[in-house]
Image: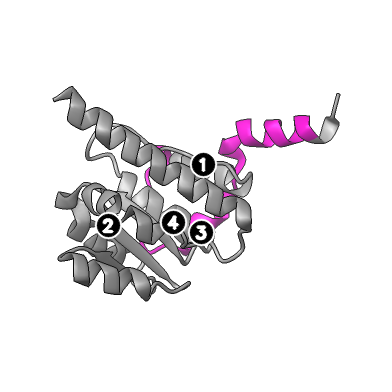
């Protein structure tokens, strides 16, 4: 029996209790279900757990992720999306968090390599599934969270390996 662990689990389960005050600083108004999504992402992030946000198209996952990053002061990161949505994400950042520096990693292999080689700790990078698979070796040594430790490198390696394996499964399934 470990009471600290039970508190940890209860805090994760009670994701609706995140402070609503943080939403007052935004120029836009999140819908209630979007606030719940941001709260859920925030609680898992603060518990140092990964998360997946999935729902119907058009319900605002992009704004939820942008809000989550702003509220939790996540100033560096990698967002992997379908290629068709790369510039949509950039536009949404400009619209909802214009202060955040954002760069798209796309284009020729040389261009992507130059962008990846110059990754900094104050920028959100957006790339496509295909690009991250093609550039897998370049990402394995990058740490997007300035407060993280060596465990995050293992997590990124595992995550990239998972994406690569999922891609292989998707290709084989067609």
Q: Which residue is mark 2?
A: 127
Q: Is residue 101 left or right of residue 46?
A: left
Disc 3 or 4, which lies upstream in sequence? 3
Between marks 3 and 4 in the image, the one whose residue lies nearer the viewer = 4
Mark 1 residue element: loop
Report the Cα–Cα distance between label 1 and label 3: 17 Å
Quick check: marks 1 and 3 in contact, CB under 8 Å?
no
Report the Cα–Cα distance between label 2 and label 1: 19 Å
Disc 2 or 4, which lies upstream in sequence? 2
Q: Is residue 9 magenta?
A: yes
Disc 1 or 4, which lies upstream in sequence? 1
x, y (%) of residue 122? Answer: 45, 73
Disc 2 or 3, which lies upstream in sequence? 3
Mark 3 residue element: helix
Q: Name the residue at 72% across, 36% down.
A: 8
x, y (%) of residue 99? Answer: 38, 74
Mark 4 residue element: loop
The majority secondary structure of the magenta stretch comes to helix
Report the Cα–Cα distance between label 2 and label 3: 22 Å
Count all numbered tags in the image, as a single digit. Answer: 4
Q: Name the residue at 25% across, 47% down.
A: 129
Between marks 1 and 4 in the image, the one whose residue lies nearer the viewer = 4
Residue at the front extreme of this rendering = 137
Residue 71 is marked as: 3
Q: Which residue is mark 4?
A: 140
Q: Which residue is mark 1?
A: 50
Q: Which residues are magenta?
A: 5-33
Report the Cα–Cα distance between label 3 and label 4: 27 Å
């Amino acid at each position: 029996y470990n009471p600290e662990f039970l508190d940890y689990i209860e805090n994760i389960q009670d994701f609706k209790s995140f402070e609503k005050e943080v939403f007052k600083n935004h120029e836009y108004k999140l819908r209630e279900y979007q606030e719940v999504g941001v709260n859920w992402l925030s609680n898992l992030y603060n518990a140092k757990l990964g998360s997946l946000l999935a729902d119907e198209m058009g319900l605002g996952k992009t704004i939820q992720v942008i809000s989550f990053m702003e509220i939790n002061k996540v100033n560096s990161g990698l967002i992997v999306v379908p290629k068709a949505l790369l510039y949509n994400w950039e536009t949404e950042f400009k619209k909802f968090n214009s202060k955040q520096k954002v760069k798209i990693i796309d284009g020729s292999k040389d261009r992507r390599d130059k962008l990846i080689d110059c990754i900094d700790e104050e920028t959100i990078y957006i790339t496509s599934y295909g690009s991250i698979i093609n550039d897998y070796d370049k990402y394995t040594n990058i740490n997007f969270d300035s407060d993280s430790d060596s465990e995050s490198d293992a997590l990124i390696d595992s995550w990239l390996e998972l994406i690569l394996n999922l891609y292989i499964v998707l290709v084989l399934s067609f």
